[in-house]
Image (cartoon, rainbow, N blue to C red):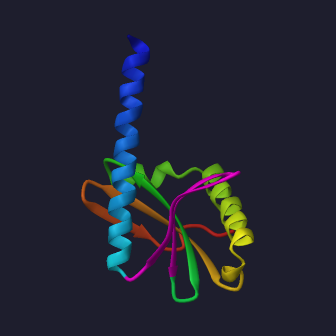
Amino acid sequence: MFLRGSQTDRQKWESKGRFAESWASLFLQLKGYQILNRRYQNPLGEIDIILKKGRTIIFCEVKARASLEKGLEALAPYQQKRIIKGALYFQSQNPQFIDYDCRFDYIIVRGFRCYHLKNAWQT
């Protein structure tokens, strides 16, 4: 019984996360960003959204949270490091972007509102 409840909770969080990523993708496209990849899997983990705008490649983490404050607390330093390593891997696999500027953004989705933090952390 406990396992079943945990599985249901996990599915609920997974569904909420997928919605947040889809909503953030639409939000970013409306702002003029080109989506290069969503849920980019690499040997080092996953990057939620990879975008391009001009000569900049943006690696974006998305979190769905009940409040902006909870969202600001949700991105741990180890996750930032994992995304940076994933970005380096992406660039190694896509040499056409090697000379592009690189940026790390963070989007917090609260309901239907997106908070877009550009250049949220540095390498």
Q: Choose between 96 and 109: the one closer to the eye.
A: 96
Residue 15 covered by magenta stretch? no
* Residue 101 placement (x, y as % from top left): 64, 83
Residue lying farthest to the bottom in this orientation:
54
Q: Is residue 28 above or below residue 9?
A: below
* Residue 32 placement (x, y as % from top left): 38, 83
* Residue 111 placement (x, y as % from top left): 25, 54
What residue span does the magenta drawing correspond to?
32-52
Residue drawn at x 69%, y 68% as measured from the top left: 123
Q: Choose between 75 and 101: the one closer to the eye.
A: 101
* Residue 122 placement (x, y as % from top left): 64, 70
Residue 1 in sight here: yes
Residue drawn at x 52%, y 79% as measured from the top left: 52
Q: Choose between 16 and 97: the one closer to the eye.
A: 97
Residue drawn at x 65%, y 50% as measured from the top left: 78
Q: Quadrant of residue 16?
A: top left
Residue drawn at x 24%, y 59% as measured from the top left: 112
Q: Is residue 35 above or below residue 15?
A: below
Residue 35 covered by magenta stretch? yes
